[in-house]
Image (cartoon, rainbow, N blue to C red):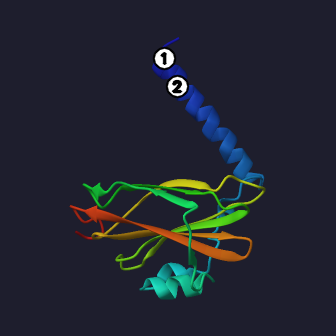
Amino acid sequence: MNALRRNVLKGAAGAGTVAVAVAAGLLKPTQALAGVPRSAFEAKNVGDALKNMGANAPADSKDISIKAPDIAENGAVVPVEVTSGIAGTTAIAILAEKNATPLVADFSLSGGAEGYVSTRIKMGQTSLVRAVVTAGGKSYTAAKEVKVTIGGCGG
């Protein structure tokens, strides 16, 4: 059997299975919702974003590690990894402080999940990338400066 034909048949079978699951109501695309209010994502500065997500005055913590490039050659795709060594981590948010809307990602962790997230963010200019971790009802933060050579937010 031709390999291309085999791949097409596999893809069609997979798509058909997903379509049946959606039609039966087993898969609902609306179940992936943001964990914080929309107003936090629409905030125009870091203070308002923190307030709207319920993380007023987070304490600095050395137990939060941010892995991001010192110099991002393209602000449209900046890889960021955040690791929390704080026990009981339930949420990790990532903010790019000089973006037009600073809150770029918010992850809710449950069921004893490891305090680790990895994503790519868009940055308009050089600024601090801030991670805000929620654990035990308290908020903690750490920051790292990322220099952007080519802007990603309209630059």
Q: Is residue 14 above or below residue 154?
A: above
Q: Which is more toward the observer, 138 or 47? A: 138
| Amino acid on which disc 2 is placed | Asn
* In this rendering, position of residue 84 left or right of residue 28: left
Residue 85 image offset from top left, x and y in percent: 63, 57
Q: Which residue is mark 2?
A: 7
Residue 6 image offset from top left, x and y in percent: 54, 20
For mark 1, does the 10 Å Cα neighbourhood hold few (<14), some (14 to 19), or many (20 or more) residues?
Answer: few
Q: Residue at x 43, y 76 (%)?
A: 102
Q: Residue furthest top?
A: 1
Q: Which residue is mark 1?
A: 3
How far is the residue under mark 1 from the one under mark 2? 6 Å
Q: Residue at x 63, y 36 (%)?
A: 14
Residue 63 image offset from top left, x and y in percent: 58, 61
| Amino acid on which disc 1 is placed | Ala
Q: Quadrant of residue 31?
A: bottom right
Dot 2 lies on which element? helix
Q: Which is more toward the observer, 10 or 122? A: 122
Q: Residue at x 63, y 33 (%)?
A: 13
Q: Residue at x 57, y 80 (%)?
A: 38
